[in-house]
Image (cartoon, helix red, strand yellow):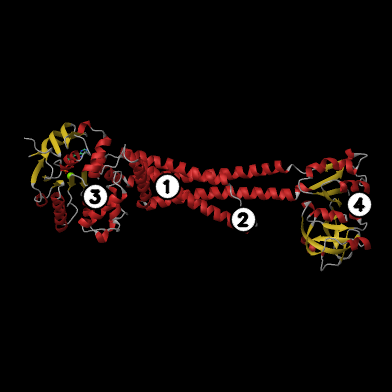
């Protein structure tokens, strides 16, 4: 075929390779499915990990990066109103409050109730603006409560039965103090470690005198700038006494999460691709034996052996690509549905999608190599001797 | 006096197969096949007919003697050049048809035109012409595996027709057909021959051999 029209030759090669797909239905089917499986797993895993790591990063940005907590090294009273005021005035600070440590204490609707225990924390009214409870009933806090001086409590929904609560407005006993329940919450925006505890506001109950933390809500992106100056603002006289837990650098955190999630994903998908590649090679190799006499006939009719070998290679690549197309479609649809169900925004690893095509071409080439080499060795006389 | 160059010129051609006992499948064959001839080669099974045909079709190489195709010394040609001659000058019809299963009549005919310089339009014209000549119009888009033996053999002959080959080599073309169908196949070969195609038919069936103008008989690898 040397010296003939190259375009004609390429079209013949492609056309013949494409129609060969249909001459070997079972082999192509198995091959396609193997490749599709590999590609679907590849897309699924890389996209799910991308989606998840972006989710984790979002969580991180929204919650952790906007929370600063300051504690004292000693058990002495250490928080002053002027100190809180200084922090409140720092640029980037949205709210500053006091949150007590968790104490395990008795709870119930009356003193007489059979004793039950739950965690409770003292919270200053402003601390609620920092931790932002997700209210499912009632209200988080009203200025009126503070003015009237009524001690109030917020109950996590998980403790409703433990406490024996029958409605908003009911009085309950927490430790030694009585509180009016003004709301029920089922989660916190910040300080998730406190999400299972009763929050009491006001009053001088036993919960009030535990070691306390200053909780600070900062505007997104301000955490790393505010944290270093919190100690001095709170205790200009003795900043060394204050321990500030500053948020991680969001970028570092995101990278570390993405790295670990993606490493797992990559391992899984590489295994899937290799397995389907092996399947592909085995099936194409067995396919060429069944086409032995067909190849002999083509040789007798004068098709150059290089053309037949190339046809088989291109055929194998096309089948691989077809499988990858199916797999990618299944993967994309699957990940989209999965993300929708779980309330995530589906994100696709575009570089990964590119690699699927590359890998499927490579696997197709490798799988096509065996039949191509076999075809090169089929003598034309086979046609008369089968 | 210069006669037309023979299509095939064999001089003392031999072919031996290795094995525990080496087999001289073809020995000392000397024959000319002239353009436009219709030749049959008869002989019992194992007499070397297929081996001779594969040598004539440039599918196998003799290990002794001289073979010329249309005046060219075949032993000096490369495998690529022999492929090219097979593609453009020689057609084959096999006992077992050797069509590509799961493809249509059209597609099987098109196979013979792959890697030729003909354009799509010209290829289509030739395929149409062959389909008409062979009376396969209603089968044009039928999967060849669904055709009767006679129809399959007609498609195989059609492959030679679309390629516009000068030489058609047939190995037991009626071997898998009943005698009535075999007869129509032979008649088709005769009509191809009347269009100028040189035909060589190998057969063990004397009735089939009768269709040829010239009969050669083989015995133990030799022409007798
Ligand atoms: N590839 C081969 N290897 C060994 N022996 C062969 C081969 N091909 C043919 N023969 C032998 O050569 C002889 C002639 O075979 P063949 O040409 O097929 O005869 P026919 O077509 O007349 O039946 C037979 O004895 C056969 O066994
Ligand atoms: Mg034979």
Mark 2 CB within 8 Å of ligand 1: no
C-beta proximity under 8 Å, tags 3 and 4: no
SS at mark 1 in the image: helix
**How crowded is the residue under tag 1: few (<14 C-alpha within 10 Å), some, or many (20+)?**
many
Distance between the Cα atoms at labels 3 and 2? 57 Å
**How crowded is the residue under tag 4: few (<14 C-alpha within 10 Å), some, or many (20+)?**
few
Quadrant hosting residue B46: top left
SS at mark 3 in the image: helix
Q: Is residue A257 left or right of residue A229?
A: left
Chain under disc 4: A
Q: Quadrant of the N terminus of chain A?
A: top left
Distance between the Cα atoms at labels 3 and 4? 102 Å
Q: Residue at x 63, y 50 (%)?
A: A51
Residue extending furthest toward the bottom: A166
Residue wearing tag 3: B162
Q: Which mark sits nearer the N-terminus, 1 or 4?
A: 4
Residue wearing tag 2: A339
Labels 3, 1: front one: 3
**How crowded is the residue under tag 3: few (<14 C-alpha within 10 Å), some, or many (20+)?**
many
Mark 4 CB within 8 Å of ligand 1: no
Chain under disc 2: A
Labels 2, 1: front one: 1
Chain under disc 1: A
Labels 4, 2: front one: 2
Residue wearing tag 4: A209
Labels 1, 4: front one: 1
Distance between the Cα atoms at labels 4 and 2? 46 Å
Vertical order, B147 against A288 (above or below): below
Q: Is residue B21 shown to the viewer in this render?
A: no
Residue A318 is marked as 1
């Amino acid at each position: 075929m040397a010296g003939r029209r190259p375009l004609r030759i390429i079209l013949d090669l492609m056309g013949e390779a494409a129609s060969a797909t249909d001459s070997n239905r079972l082999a192509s089917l198995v091959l396609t499915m193997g490749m599709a499986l590999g590609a679907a797993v590849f897309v699924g895993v890389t996209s799910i990990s991308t989606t998840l790591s972006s989710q984790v990063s979002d969580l991180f940005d929204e919650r952790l990066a906007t929370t600063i907590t300051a504690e004292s090294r000693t058990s002495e009273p250490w928080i002053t109103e002027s100190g809180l005021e200084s922090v409140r005035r720092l640029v980037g600070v949205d709210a500053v409050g006091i949150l007590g440590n968790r104490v395990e204490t008795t709870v119930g609707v009356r003193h007489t109730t059979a004793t039950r225990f739950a965690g409770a924390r003292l919270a200053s009214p402003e601390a609620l603006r920092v931790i932002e409870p997700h209210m499912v009933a009632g209200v988080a806090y009203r200025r009126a409560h503070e003015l009237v001086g009524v001690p109030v409590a917020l109950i996590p929904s998980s403790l409703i039965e433990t406490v024996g609560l029958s409605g908003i407005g009911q009085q309950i006993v927490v430790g030694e103090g009585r509180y009016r329940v003004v709301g029920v919450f089922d989660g916190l925006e910040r300080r998730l470690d406190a999400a299972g505890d009763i929050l009491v506001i006001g009053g001088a109950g036993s919960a009030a005198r535990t070691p306390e933390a200053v909780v600070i809500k900062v505007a997104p992106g301000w955490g790393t700038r505010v944290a270093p100056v919190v100690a001095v603002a709170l205790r200009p006289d003795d900043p060394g006494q204050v321990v500030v837990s500053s948020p991680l650098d969001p970028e570092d955190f995101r990278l570390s999460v993405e790295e670990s999630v993606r490493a797992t994903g990559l391992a899984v998908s590489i295994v899937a691709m290799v397995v389907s590649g092996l399947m592909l090679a085995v099936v194409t190799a067995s396919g060429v034996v069944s086409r032995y006499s067909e190849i002999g006939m083509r040789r007798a009719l004068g098709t150059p052996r290089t053309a037949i070998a190339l046809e088989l290679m291109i055929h194998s690549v096309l089948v691989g690509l077809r499988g990858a197309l199916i797999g990618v479609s299944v993967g994309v649809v699957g990940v989209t549905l999965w993300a929708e169900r779980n309330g995530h925004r589906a994100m696709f690893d575009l570089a990964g999608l590119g690699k699927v095509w590359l890998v499927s071409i490579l696997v197709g080439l490798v799988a096509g190599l065996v039949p191509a080499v076999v075809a090169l060795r089929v003598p034309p006389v086979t046609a008369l001797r089968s | 006096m210069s006669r037309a160059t023979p299509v095939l010129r064999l001089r003392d051609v031999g072919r031996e197969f290795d094995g525990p006992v080496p087999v001289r499948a073809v020995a000392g064959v000397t024959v000319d096949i002239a353009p436009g001839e219709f030749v049959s080669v008869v002989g019992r099974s194992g007499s070397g007919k297929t081996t001779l045909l594969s040598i004539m079709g440039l599918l196998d190489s003799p290990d002794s003697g001289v073979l010329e195709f249309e005046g060219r010394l075949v032993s000096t040609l490369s495998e690529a050049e022999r492929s090219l001659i097979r593609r453009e000058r020689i057609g084959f019809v096999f006992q077992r048809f050797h069509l590509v299963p799961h493809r249509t009549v059209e597609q099987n005919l098109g196979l013979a035109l792959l890697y030729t310089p003909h354009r799509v339009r010209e290829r289509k014209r030739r395929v149409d012409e062959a389909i008409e000549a062979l009376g396969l119009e209603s089968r044009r888009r039928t999967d060849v595996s669904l055709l009767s033996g006679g129809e399959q053999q007609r498609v195989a002959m059609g492959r030679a027709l679309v390629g516009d080959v000068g030489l058609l080599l047939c190995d037991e073309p009626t071997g898998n057909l009943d005698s009535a169908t075999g007869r129509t196949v032979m008649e088709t070969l005769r009509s191809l021959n009347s269009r100028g195609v040189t035909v060589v038919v190998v057969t063990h069936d004397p009735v089939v051999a009768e269709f040829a103008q010239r009969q050669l008989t083989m015995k133990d690898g030799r022409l007798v």
